[in-house]
Image: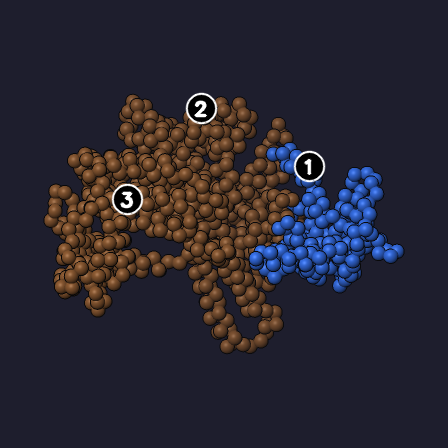
Chain colours: A blue, B brown
Amino acid sequence: MTEAMLDMELEQEEDTQKDKYLIFALGKEYYGIEIQRVTEIIGVQPITEVPELPEYIKGIINLRGKIIPVMDVRIRFKKPFKEYNDRTCVIIIDLEEISIGLIVDGVAEVAIIPETEIVSPPEMDQNSNRFIKGIGKISTEVKLILDCYQLLNETENEKLNSIDNGRESI
Amino acid sequence: MTNIEWEPLLEMFIFETTQMLEQLEQNILKGEEAKIFDASDINEIFRIMHTIKSSAAMMQCLPISKVAHSVEDLFSCLREDKPQNIEYSILTDLILDVLDFMKAGIEKVSARVELNDDPTRLIQKINDRLYAIKNENGDGNKEFILCNNYRATIFFEDDCGMEHLRAFTLVHNLKEHTESMDEIIPSNLDEDKSQEIIKQEGLKIRFRSLKTNEQMHEILSNNPFIRDLLFEQILEEQETLNTAKGESYQSKEGGAEEENTNKTVHQNLISVNVTKLDMLMDIVGELVISEAMVLQNPDLTGLKIDNFQKSSIQLQKITNELRDIVMSIRMLPLSTTFRKMQRLVRDMSKKLDKEVRLITSGEETEVDKNIIENISDPLMHLVRNSLDHGIESSEEREATNKPKIGTISLEAKHVGSDVLIIIKDDGGGLDKKKILAKAKANGLLHKAENEMSDKEIYNLIFLPGFSTKESVTEFSGRGVGMDVVMRSIGNIGGTVSVDSKEGAGSTITMKIPLTLAIIDGMIIQVGKGWYTLPITAIRESFRPNEHDIIKDSENHEMIIVRGQCYPIIRLHELYKIHTKITDFKNGILVMVEQGEKSICLFADALLGQQQVVVKSLPNYIRNVKKIVGVTGCTLLGDGNISLILDIGSLIDFRNINLIKNYKSNL
């Protein structure tokens, strides 16, 4: 009985979050991220550097006692580094027990993009748009829908390389 | 009732039953050692089985309940009849089987899997044993022996009235459970005059029943309005009242009292969910941090606030005390873990047909709960190894003038902020040649054979893919060996080392930290970052004289301190941190040691000492890369994060680099 109610609540919640995307800016482009992944948005905090990590992982921050890694999405996308300012935001996302902060140029809005308005990205070569899982259209504007899972896990190749390097060094 | 409401009850049941089973196991093993169960052991076992029987029935774990029931019968027989010639080893085997069955059952329950084990065979075994014991000690007449003789005297409550009718109902009810009703005094319950007699002298009955003493007592006392119940079992030979026997169940009140004393002991302990403790720990950690935030608040600088200072000292005291208490709550003695080993040694030595004794000491040593959970498996593995590979067979032992019974000793003790667990056996010891040959065959040797010290050779066994025993047995030698031990101990920040004497046995030492949660740390600064070193690892810190520093041909820096030479690691170089302080005379050297090795770390400055709450690095970072020398991080008073350095891996790292350079120069 209670379970059924919980299910219903969850469904409702899912319904209200469905098709909603948090839109953020990165240079001239606008990206979207599924709203149910986002836990909160904060300003830039002092970041503690952690050595030996890939350049795009800026370090860790203290979010009310929770320690969360932060990733500079600009550098992740091989864009030039931009000095952080008042507009810079950290979007905290939760993905399968992993919390991570994404540093972006600024947050724009929450927009509804129905499934029918999202097309899959053109297939060029394998690497060019592995982080984009779709392109959403709102009237004339275009938002790139981020694949959070890829964003976090697409380190496999680099990781393997680093292990190989490690072996050589021993 | 829904599942949710059951949950707390079920958890309680699992917790209590597990505890009782553990206690039981200990009792049994103790009894086996002494080759006799004394009365208190039997009573204890009986009591535990009785409790398990009823609680399991309540939680609807019927197989467990049924088995407990038959064991209860068995022990009630032991308790009541005090049979003389019992085969204790058979009995203990049987009880241990029962324990395993129950443990498996409890595990299933805690995994929320349906409990469908079939207890019939086990119960059959128990009943067979019961018959056997009764037969051996009685006159061989099964039927007759099983029919117990009882006598009971019952007093009804003073003002219940109509005693004779109540007695009549009681006798009537009783008939369902008895084989024969031998004697009822007063005999004629229909007559009014018996009412007075019952009032004065009580209702006296004698009967035979297949039921056990315990069951009969229950049946009797379940009748309403009973004030006093004198109840005993009569053996054929001794028709007269046996006082010793009567004691335990003389009256209801007596029994209740016994129960009560047990209860008061239990009420001093409450079981708390570990997640709640973890939460408490976290909150206290937060408190410590925010306390520092308040007390070191930059707004306060330059103010003359004496009263504030006084109260803040008070606050500090309380938070420190609170933190210590919370830490101590999480500490558990190692005794449970050691007890498991007792059982393991017993079972294995029987199966392998080796006579082995396990001596434990220091089991009262307390360590953090997380650590206990993590060392149990490695410890078991090591003990198993000692038994299987270490201790020789009895014949071999006799041939080499060793005592026939092998000894494994398990010792735990505090050394500084670490706990040492030492496993020692007096077996054959490690075979250097075999180890070397094996290491060579598996390509694990990185050094010339003749350059290696004995200790280095022995420690080869911890490398992955190493197992010297040719034959794979049930217990060990599957090739996944010591490296697993090494890894799981390493995971909790500990180390393992081995030493051995050929022919005289080997010693394995596990060094594990006392707690994972809070350490005394020294905060150092390198560039813009703060790093924390565990205070216990620091030997000294000093500003070096330029002329004490020497460089080898590969530009490795070293320093001579009091005639000893120590390697230097520049942290800013290691971690590629940008800092202005690269000259030794501006920074500071911190000498740290781990095991027998020392190393000097070069940092910009010491910032001060602080107790820090250890937090692990976020999962994401751990998944991306294992960072050399960093075990975790901590929050400082000002909300900043500091990385905690691991001395052991820094030293290893330095050694690996040396080897690398050495090789590249060849």
| Chain at numbered mark 3 | B
Q: Which residue is mark 1?
A: A161
Q: Nearer the viewer, residue B458 or B213?
A: B213
Number of marks drawn: 3
Residue type beneath disc 1: Asn
The numbered mark 2 sits on a residue in which chain? B
**Residue closest to the far right:** A140
Looking at marks 2 and 3 on the same chain, the residue that comes earlier in the sequence is marked by: 3
* Cα distance between the residues tagged 1 and 3: 66 Å
Residue at point 28%, 28% (across, down): B404
Residue identified by numbered label 3: B73
The secondary element bearing badge 2 is classed as loop
Residue at the location (45% across, 39% down)?
Answer: B378
Residue type for callout 3:
Asp
Residue B245 visible to the viewer:
no
Q: Is B545 displayed left or right of B98 in the figure?
A: right
Tell whether A57 sits left or right of B356.
Answer: right
Foreground tag (2 vs 3): 3
Question: Where is residue B222 drawn, in percent x and y?
Answer: 28, 57
**Circle 1 residues within 10 Å: few <14, some 14–19, many ≥20:** few
Q: Quadrant of residue B657?
A: top right
> Residue B551: x and y, percent?
60, 40
Residue at left offset 34%, top offset 57%: B266
Question: Which kind of residue does numbered mark 2 sit on?
Answer: Ser
Q: Position of residue A102 (x, y in %)?
A: 71, 54
Is residue B323 visible in the rendered structure shown here? yes
Does B555 appear above or below B268?
A: above
Which label lies toward us, 1 or 3? 3
The residue identified by callout 2 is B471
Mark 1 on the same chain as mark 2: no
Around disc 2, counting alpha carbons within 10 Å, would you say few (fewer than 14), some (14 to 19), or many (20 or more)? Answer: few
